[in-house]
Amino acid sequence: EIVLTQSPGTLSLSPGERATLSCKTSQSVGSSYLAWFQQKPGQAPRLLIYGASTRATGIPDRFSGSGSGTDFTLTISRLEPDDFAVYYCQQSGSSPLTFGGGTRVEI
Amino acid sequence: QVQLQESGPGLVKPSETLSLTCTVSGGSINRGGYFWTWIRQLSGRGLEWIGDNDYSDIRNYNPSLKSRVDISVDTSKSQFSLKLKSVTAADTAVYYCARRTYFGSGRYDPNKYYIDYWGQGALVTVSS
């Protein structure tokens, strides 16, 4: 199965700063078979990005995704208080579907 | 707005079968373009895809769980279900039902299903 490694484990930033989250896969997942999710405590994950770079419905444009092959990035251009959460990447290029271990973005 | 809601026992004894049901509202379960999915979250962080099924009974399972898992869809009740046999403490987790939707265009690409709706999650503890 494809292993997804997210870094850093925790990102400590302030509102208004830029957040850059990395997701590396153990094998190529193609140009677009990657999604990003946001999870807040006590809630289910929420789809932010699919196809590596397409924002899901209702997701603000301060969230952007990029990358292909084995290296992907989620960027939050200017952090808002509501953005402090855990972020997961997930690949759909090969079965079984797998998730990264998450990056916590904290104040 | 599509909503999914898990239901089932919150406590299961070791060696028994974990059974959960997900009720879908606000959208049809009886159409193509969707896989009805179960995912679990272990120890508050690690997400694990268990498997899924579409309305025509095409099933996909995680090989690590395949021998113990059955996912079925009941279109008449707009529900889908998870059964996980022979559970141990390692199966203690929050179990989510979810919908994987096809986001492709043009030539069909089976890799372009993405998880766009989730239930709120159900904590299941395996303990005697």
Image (cartoon, rainbow, N blue to C red):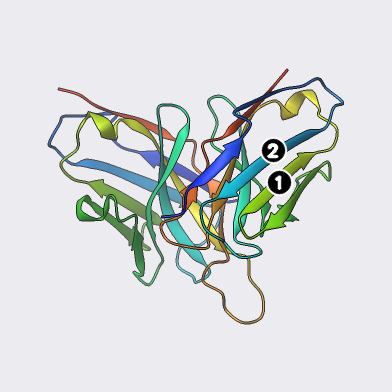
Q: Quadrant of residue A51?
A: bottom right
Residue tagged by mark 1?
Answer: A73
* Relative depth, front residue between B34 and B127: B127
Residue at (50% x, 54% y) in the render: B99
Q: Nearer the viewer, residue B74 or A31?
A: A31
Q: Residues within 10 Å of mark 2 (few under 14, many from 20)?
A: many
Q: Quadrant of residue A32?
A: bottom right
Residue that protrudes farthest toward the left in the picture: B15
With respect to residue B14, does A52 lie above or below?
below
Q: Residue at x 43, y 57 (%)?
A: B36
Disc 2 secondary structure class: strand
Please state which amino acid type lies under the numbered disc 1.
Answer: Thr
Dot 1: element: strand
Please state which of residues A96 and B75 is positioned toward the viewer in this rendering.
Answer: A96
* Residue denoted by label 2: A21
- Judged from this view, the residue extending furthest toward the top is A107
User: B101 left or right of A21?
Assistant: left
- Residue A41, given in percent of the width and then of the height, sits at 56, 24
- Residue B5, image x and y in percent? 45, 42
Vertical side of A54 occupied by B47: above or below: above
Q: Residue at x 62, y 52 (%)?
A: A35
Q: Is residue B80 rendered to the left or right of residue B83?
A: right
Q: Are marks 2 and 1 in contact (CB under 8 Å)?
A: yes
- Closer to the N terminus: mark 2 or mark 1? 2
Q: Chain of mark 1?
A: A
The answer to which quarter of the image holds residue B41 is top left
Q: Is residue B121 above or below residue A35?
A: above
Give x and y (percent) for residue B8: 30, 37
Marks 2 and 1 share the same chain: yes
